[in-house]
Image: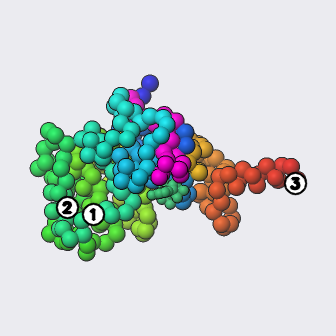
Amino acid sequence: MSDVLLRLERLEVVYHRVITAVQGVSLEVPRSGIVALLGTNGAGKTTTLRAISGFIGLDDARVTEGAIVYGGSRIENRAPHRITAHGIALVPERSKVFENLSVAENLEAVVPRPGADRRRLAESIYELFPALARLRAREAGYLSGGERQMLAIGSALACAPDLLLVDELSQGLAPVIVEELVGRLRRVRAELGTTILLVEQNAHVALDVADYGYVMENGRVVLDGTPERLRAHADIQEFYLGAGGGERRRSYREVKQYRRSRRWYG
Ligand code: ATP
């Protein structure tokens, strides 16, 4: 049996006491694994990551059912700084860096977990991202999208996490930059042993880097499997991997309904 670092058990998350964004989500992230959470807009991926990292509290949301079990302890509804101290760091979808601070100051602004060697951490971050070393003195507001994403990942790694949560690695970036970032994430796992849970709308990217994937729709997990299994799945090919002959991207539910109607009437 694999060593599970993070387990979500029938998780439910509600915004403003009325809007249920995540319903009955269960998933597992093995230690030193890379797991992807896929899904279209509004599926509940960001909410799931923010629930794990504790940031949903800032969005007036709460875990109302189920459990988040990390390293054997329940952590749902804890404050973000307590969760960071446990070894979980989030690379958020937006507001990734302090724009008025330099690259070096951004990294120095992070408070690492107790006992972490700040100097060695900084060295390994600059080794993993040589571009950040070259741009040390540059104000973060002047960085390109790819450099900003590197700094955001670097800042999260400066917390010395065991689990890195990455929200939309590829968003708004050119394919060549995304490929480079994917390579860096692989090195983060290989060299630092960090476990990674990655949220992605881009299925090609997610299935390229992950060992295992979960697909979310309307707040629920509708499918999961290895990249090979997910790539081979007709519905994933049709509505995520663009094998549907250029039709607009449909939801998993729509594809299911379409298939059923073809069976009945066709
Ligand atoms: P995207 O890729 O577009 O960010 P997502 O899969 O990450 O999509 P979420 O952002 O988690 O999806 O949104 C899930 C649901 O929760 C959506 O219906 C969304 O409208 C709702 N939601 C998200 N944030 C809030 C908020 N602050 N208040 C109320 N509802 C919210």
> Which is in the foreground here, disc 3 or disc 2?
2
Q: Residue at x 82, y 53 (%)?
A: 262
Report whether 246 appears left or right of 171.
right
Dot 1 corresponds to which residue?
Answer: 97
- Residue 187, position in %: x, y? 31, 49
151 w.r.t. 253: above or below: below
Q: Amino acid at mark 3?
A: Gly
Tell me whether the residue at label 1 lies in contact with that at label 3, contact meaning CB atoms closer than 8 angstroms.
Answer: no
Does residue 25 sit above or below 219 in this rendering? Answer: above
Q: Which residue is mark 3?
A: 266
Q: Disc 3, ligand 1: is the CB inside 8 Å? A: no
Q: Which mark is residue 239?
A: none
Q: Which residue is mark 2?
A: 106
For label 3, count other residues whose C-alpha is less than 10 Å away and answer few (under 14), some (14-19) or many (20+).
few
70 and 184: which is toward the camera: 70
The relative height of residue 76 versus residue 124 in the rendered view (above or below) is above
| Mark 1–mark 2 CB contact (< 8 Å) | yes
| x and y, in percent, of residue 159 in the image | 23, 48
Residue at the extreme top:
1
Q: Secondary structure at mark 1?
A: loop
Q: Disc 1 residue type?
A: Val
Q: How is the image coloured?
A: rainbow
Looking at the rendering, the stretch of residues picked out in magenta corresponds to 3-22
